[in-house]
Image (cartoon, rainbow, N blue to C red):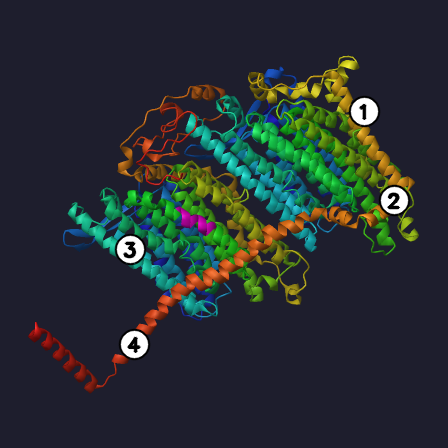
């Protein structure tokens, strides 16, 4: 079982080899085999989940030398921690669904299509589990190629423009990242590091002035992938042109590569710079939330509307990350998964009606609820989860993001972002109403068939997860919690640990503890007001162990503002 | 102690799952309705057991929490799925399950033969479940789940007849306006959590912990911010100015839905929330003033609109907005108990009124259908003289109307009078008190007027529908009439558990049971007021209280008299009045054009701005820049391409040119 991560990564490639032996006319076999491979991959990946121990370390690590380059060795160094674990599972979970979703939609070049899907899966999983940064970069670039072909070959009318735009946008960012990456390598050699393990680079203590440039290069690459405003315009084009499976994978997993890049690389490698640019990135994130919502509101094409809603959702993720505290980060991680499920499901939904009517214009529909009741119910559930109605998955993540943001220096950003909950309801419900409600007037819609068994089978797992993660998110949070706590401690810049401010403690605390019959709030991990005041080790104990009264706060509730704080919100 | 309290929300949830998943297959209306109503009846029984158990405890120990499971735990934050049992939540579950059951029962008759019968009952059960979460949740987040859940069910049920565009629009409007309020709720939650955590290291959203540590909060300042945010949430849910416009539109839903959600339970959630966190609100005089003024203004403003509507349900809708205004007035003057008391009596008489109007509409609809008439079954101008056709409906409706009008002896009188007296005598608002009382009293007069106008137009005089249809008018079946009778009975006697002190003393020292029962919930507020008593002094004058009581009753009687004069004795006057003041009538009839105003200043600019961002910014500026870069590169490469002519002589010439340039450089250097 020690190679289980490699097994999960390369099972899809193995599937590609098998596909080579199957004649291209044998579409049913091609499809069935691909589905089987992705299903097996998913089942194998569940072993990672069950074997995962809830701690902050990388697990299932495989670390062997790979390419030797002088004193420096590129290693095949992989592993999962609480942050990548769920993203790997999300990937293996979404893949069989994607395969099944294009069962009928793709009739041309089925073999090539399936090969693209499988290569994509390998590269996605590989990128999430790479500890070696060189390996990560290879996977990061590799995943562009199958997606480029998927949009370019099986896409819609305007597919060439969209796929070239997608490719070049991403490449520009990647190249800047590569430059920063090479510089990082040079810094590493100076410091005596002998391989590309990101864990070694974490300890480099890079000069903050240099960090700025390297952070910007990484941040730009990842911001394009997320995508953050104003680098988002490739996304609506790519989504509208991509086949359903392409859209699902793009939205559910590939966009997470950007946010994951921030969590794994940009923020912990360059913490000072990350703090310095937090106001800028948070501003872009919040603009993204509002901007994308307003633009989504006036879209005429359902798929484009969903694409813009993605931009808004990812804005929440980014905001949570730059809150730099446990609540915000946990919310962001949850929101990445939630977005994968909800938006993936939305693209599937759009795919269903597109396959039936070959149009996605909102005005072509109306009153479908009467004709397609199962479809209507599922669409409604997914819509509500996208809006973040409590009880569905969208809620817990969004709530924690906003709570974390509010606790951090990004309070005013968060206030603006919170208004996003209104806009989300506006554009989603308005779209839903125009598509599903009203009289069934268009004669072409009057013969529409409700979902068939295959389509229902695709949707059921997603719907189940929507409710499970909404009602009981704690198991998901528990697995990622130690890793997030470690990360939060890690990205607190060294320069901020210098000062500790003593305050007298209000006596209130003990009284409350005795009052509460229920579980006391878990350890204080946030960094409200000012991060510098916390102990460098991070406290993960219970309330009793920590200084009562938050350092840096005087009793009347005024935040004292130490000069070391790089981006005070006031 | 309260181990089985989880049954209260879970039963309707089970009902929802059964009907939602299998209802289409079950088909049998009796089974579907029976499951749904039975589930709520079960909740009612458990609620009764719970409140009896609570009453058996000494009043200081009447609070308990029952944890079901740990829900979200992250960093500083922890929220459980756990229920809070105290006098306030118990009174709410009694109202929700009791009135809820009656309305479920009524719906079996009312919705008979509807296409989405199972869907309707599934939603109704889901609503009841959410409402239980809202009132039983032991922390702000669980309350918020219920809060959003009831909003969602409201959306689904308003849009029940989804093929009608107006129904879809109304549902969406309700949801979005509620979301505006939710925005406030969330901000309030965040600010409170952050403030208590960062200044006192109390990271909690649990009501009991918040209450116990409320003495650490300052007066005003941050508390004003927090409470105003929460109040914004309340205005959305409870349809107060400025977010009230969704409620009248919500009448697109089936009438029992209006009775349950948009009169008796959901819309009172804002009132409940303020009462639940009374210890916060009492600490902000500014917020209290805002609440009192908004409440009084809403009470008066909505009452004016109610006087000119012709749709029977719309009159009741504006009446609900107006009565909710009273409840907020009570909250704003610190009379939390009185507000909850009015919440309860209002649930009785308004549910009765809505269900009664439903019976009328049902009968009208059937009659008009038989006569192949396309007249509006909800328009009171088509009604009249129904009291002989529907005597039971009429009797119950009349009792509820007397109750809402505030006639002494009926439930509405006790609760409304308590609020008006507290508005006058409270220690919070100084000179504003007289104005608050005055607005409340005038609104009471208007209430009496429009309610009796409704009764007179509907049940008295000549029947105005076609004679052919008239013969088909009939009393409703027992399943519809029985809830009416129960609710009418409660409308009459429901007030006697909360007899105001002045009256109680006269009739032999009957205490105000209701106030006494709720007092543990408001303990922290009372402690706060006791500490700050020197700064504030209320009015305590028995003679004055009697005087004001008499005045408000007199005003109500005048309202009734005017309604009688205009709509029974001298029916020509209203027409002459509208002819004399056409502009005023138009404005009132069109709800003072508030919807149009909102469209003009918010909705349309938002859409236009979205269009601009998309077509202007996204396409022109961002993509323009991107494509511009690409085109520039293309243009340059096109230029460079010109040099690659492929002619050897050209290359030779340019090489020679280069050699000359280089040589010149070296020689001249």
On the image, the x and y values in percent for residue B266 come to: 65, 37
Which of the chains bears the disc numbered 1?
B
- Please state which of residues B633 and B521 is positioned toward the viewer in this rendering: B633
Task: Check if residue A249 falls in the magenta segment.
Answer: no
Q: Residue at x 90, y 52 (%)?
A: B466
Magenta segment boundaries in residue numbering: A282-289
Considering only vertical position in the picture, is A66 above or below B508? below
Label 1–label 3 contact, CB within 8 A:
no
- Residue B404: x %, y % from top left: 77, 32
State yes or no: residue A283 in magenta.
Answer: yes
Question: Mark 3 — residue?
Answer: A177
Q: Which percent across, then down, holds residue A562?
A: 33, 33
Looking at this view, is B127 or A54 the one in front?
B127
Which numbered disc flags the more N-terminal residue, 1 or 2? 1
Residue B51 shown left or right of residue B461 in the figure: left
- Mark 1 packing: few (<14 Cα in 10 Å), some, or many (20+)? some
The residue singled out by tag 4 in the image is: B639
Mark nearest the camera among 1 and 3 is 1
- Label 3 and label 4: CA atoms lie apart by 30 Å
- Cα separation, mark 4 vs mark 2, equals 87 Å
- Say whether mark 2 and mark 1 are on the same chain: yes
Quadrant of the rendered image containing residue A142: bottom left
Pointer 1: what residue?
B409
- Of the two numbered discs 4 and 2 on the same chain, state the one appearing first in sequence: 2
- Does the CB distance between marks 4 and 2 fall below 8 Å? no
Mark 1 or mark 4: whose residue is earlier in sequence: 1
Query: Could you tell me what secondary structure mostly forms the magenta stretch?
Result: helix
Q: Where does label 2 land, which residue? A: B573
Is residue B382 rendered to the left or right of residue B514?
A: right
Co-location on one chain, circles 1 and 3: no
């Amino acid at each position: 079982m020690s190679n289980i991560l490699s097994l999960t990564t390369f099972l899809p490639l193995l599937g590609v080899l098998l596909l080579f032996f199957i004649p291209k006319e044998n579409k049913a076999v091609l499809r069935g085999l691909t589905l089987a491979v992705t299903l097996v991959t998913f089942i194998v990946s569940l072993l990672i989940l069950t074997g995962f121990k809830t701690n902050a370390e990388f697990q299932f690590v495989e670390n062997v030398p790979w390419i030797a380059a002088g004193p420096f060795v590129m290693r095949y160094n992989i592993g999962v921690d609480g942050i990548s674990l769920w993203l790997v599972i999300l990937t293996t979970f979404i893949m069989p669904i994607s395969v099944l979703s294009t069962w009928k939609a793709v009739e041309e070049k089925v073999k090539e299509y399936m090969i693209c899907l499988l290569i994509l899966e390998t590269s996605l999983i590989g990128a999430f589990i790479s500890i070696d940064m060189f390996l990560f970069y290879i996977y990061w670039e590799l995943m562009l190629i199958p997606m480029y072909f998927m949009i370019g070959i099986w896409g819609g009318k305007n597919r060439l423009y969209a796929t070239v735009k997608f490719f070049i946008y991403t490449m520009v960012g990647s190249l800047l990242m590569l430059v920063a990456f090479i510089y990082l390598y040079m810094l590493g050699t100076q410091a005596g590091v002998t391989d590309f393990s990101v864990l070694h680079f974490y300890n480099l203590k890079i000069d903050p002035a240099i960090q700025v440039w390297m952070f910007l290069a990484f941040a730009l690459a990842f911001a394009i992938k997320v995508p953050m405003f104003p680098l988002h315009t490739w996304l609506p084009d790519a989504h509208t042109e991509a086949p359903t499976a392409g859209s699902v994978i793009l939205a559910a997993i590939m966009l997470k590569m950007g946010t994951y890049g921030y969590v794994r690389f940009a923020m912990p490698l360059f913490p000072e710079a990350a703090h310095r640019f937090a106001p800028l990135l948070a501003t872009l994130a919040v603009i993204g939330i509002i901007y994308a919502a307003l633009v989504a509101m006036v879209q005429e094409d359902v798929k484009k509307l969903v694409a813009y809603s993605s931009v808004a959702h990812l804005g929440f993720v980014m905001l949570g990350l730059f809150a730099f505290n446990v609540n915000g980060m946990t919310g962001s991680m949850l929101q990445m998964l939630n977005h994968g499920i909800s938006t993936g499901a939305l693209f599937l939904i759009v795919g269903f009606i597109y396959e039936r009517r070959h149009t996605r214009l909102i005005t072509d529909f109306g009153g479908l609820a009467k004709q397609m009741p199962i479809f209507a119910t599922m669409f409604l559930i997914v819509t509500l989860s996208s809006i973040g109605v409590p009880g569905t998955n969208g809620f817990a993540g969004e709530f924690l993001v906003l709570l974390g943001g509010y606790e951090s220096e990004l309070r005013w950003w968060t206030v603006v972002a919170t208004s996003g909950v209104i806009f989300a309801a506006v554009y989603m419900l308005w779209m839903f109403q125009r598509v599903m409600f009203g009289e069934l007037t268009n004669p072409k819609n009057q013969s529409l068939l409700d979902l068939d068994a295959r389509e229902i089978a695709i949707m059921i797992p997603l719907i189940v997860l929507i409710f499970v993660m909404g009602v009981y998110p704690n198991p998901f949070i528990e697995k990622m919690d130690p890793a997030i706590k470690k990360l939060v401690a890690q990205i607190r810049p060294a320069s901020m640990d210098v000062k500790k401010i003593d305050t007298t403690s209000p006596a209130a605390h003990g009284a409350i503890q005795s009052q509460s019959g229920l579980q006391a709030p878990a350890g204080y991990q946030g960094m409200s007001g000012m991060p510098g005041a916390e102990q460098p080790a991070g406290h993960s104990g219970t309330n009793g162990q920590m200084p009562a009264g938050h350092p840096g706060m005087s009793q009347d509730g005024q935040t004292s503002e130490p000069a070391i704080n790089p981006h005070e919100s006031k | 102690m309260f181990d089985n309290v989880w049954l209260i929300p879970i039963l309707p949830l089970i009902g929802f799952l059964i009907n939602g998943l299998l209802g289409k297959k079950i088909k049998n209306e009796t089974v579907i309705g029976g499951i749904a109503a039975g589930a709520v009846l079960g909740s009612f029984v458990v609620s009764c057991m719970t409140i009896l158990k609570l009453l058996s405890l000494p009043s200081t120990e009447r609070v308990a929490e029952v944890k079901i499971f740990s829900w979200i735990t992250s960093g500083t934050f922890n929220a459980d799925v756990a229920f809070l049992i105290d006098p306030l939540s118990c009174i709410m579950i009694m109202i929700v399950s009791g009135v809820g059951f009656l309305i479920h029962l009524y719906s079996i008759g009312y919705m008979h033969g509807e296409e989405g019968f199972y869907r309707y009952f599934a939603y109704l059960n889901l609503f009841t479940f959410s409402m239980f979460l809202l009132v039983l949740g032991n922390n702000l987040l669980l309350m918020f789940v219920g809060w959003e859940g009831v909003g969602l069910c409201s959306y689904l049920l308003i849009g029940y007849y989804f093929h009608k565009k107006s129904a879809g629009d109304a549902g969406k409007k309700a949801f979005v306006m509620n979301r505006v309020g939710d925005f406030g709720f969330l901000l309030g939650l965040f600010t409170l959590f952050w403030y208590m955590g960062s200044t006192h290291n109390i990271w909690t959203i649990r009501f009991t912990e918040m209450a116990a540590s409320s003495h650490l909060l300052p007066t005003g300042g941050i508390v004003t911010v927090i409470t105003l945010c929460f109040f914004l949430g309340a205005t959305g849910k409870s349809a107060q100015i400025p977010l009230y416009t969704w409620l009248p539109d919500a009448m697109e839903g089936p009438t029992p839905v209006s009775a349950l959600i948009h009169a008796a339970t959901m819309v009172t959630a804002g009132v409940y929330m303020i009462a639940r966190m009374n210890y916060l609100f009492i600490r902000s005089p500014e917020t209290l003033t805002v609440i009192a003024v908004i409440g009084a203004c809403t009470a008066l403003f909505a009452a004016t609109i109610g006087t000119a509507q012709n749709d029977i349900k719309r009159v009741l809708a504006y009446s609900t907005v107006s009565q909710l205004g009273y409840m907020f007035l009570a909250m704003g003057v610190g009379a939390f108990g009185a507000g909850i008391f009015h919440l309860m009596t209002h649930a009785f008489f308004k549910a009765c009124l809505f269900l009664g109007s439903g019976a009328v509409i049902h009968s009208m609809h059937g009659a008009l259908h038989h006569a192949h008439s396309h007249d509006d079954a909800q328009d009171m101008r088509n009604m009249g003289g129904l009291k002989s056709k529907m005597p039971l409906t009429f009797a119950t409706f009349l009792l509820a109307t007397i109750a809402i009008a505030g006639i002494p002896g009926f439930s509405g009188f006790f609760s409304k009078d308590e609020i008006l007296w507290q508005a006058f005598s409270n220690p919070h608002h100084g000179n504003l008190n007289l104005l608050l009382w005055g607005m409340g009293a005038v609104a009471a007069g208007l209430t009496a007027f429009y309610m009796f106008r409704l009764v007179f137009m509907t049940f008295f005089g000549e029947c105005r529908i076609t004679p052919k249809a008239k013969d088909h008018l009939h009393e409703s079946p027992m399943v519809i009439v029985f809830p009416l009778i129960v609710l009418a009975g409660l409308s009459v006697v429901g007030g006697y558990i909360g007899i105001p002190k002045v009256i109680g003393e006269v009739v032999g020292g009957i205490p105000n049971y209701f106030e006494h029962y709720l007092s543990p919930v408001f303990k922290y507020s009372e402690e706060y007021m006791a500490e700050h008593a020197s700064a504030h002094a209320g009015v305590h004058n028995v003679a004055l209280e009697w005087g004001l009581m008499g005045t408000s009753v007199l005003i109500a009687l005048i309202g009734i008299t005017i309604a009688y004069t205009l709509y029974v004795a001298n029916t020509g006057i209203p027409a002459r009045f509208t002819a004399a003041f056409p502009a005023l009538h138009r404005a009132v009839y069109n709800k003072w054009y508030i919807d149009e105003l909102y469209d003009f200043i918010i909705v349309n600019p938002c859409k236009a701005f979205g269009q601009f961002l998309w077509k202007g910014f996204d396409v022109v500026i961002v993509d323009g820049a991107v494509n511009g870069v690409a085109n520039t590169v293309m243009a340059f490469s096109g230029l460079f391409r010109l040099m690659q002519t492929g002619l050897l002589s050209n290359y030779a010439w340019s090489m020679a040119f280069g050699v000359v340039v280089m040589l010149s450089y070296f020689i001249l250097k």
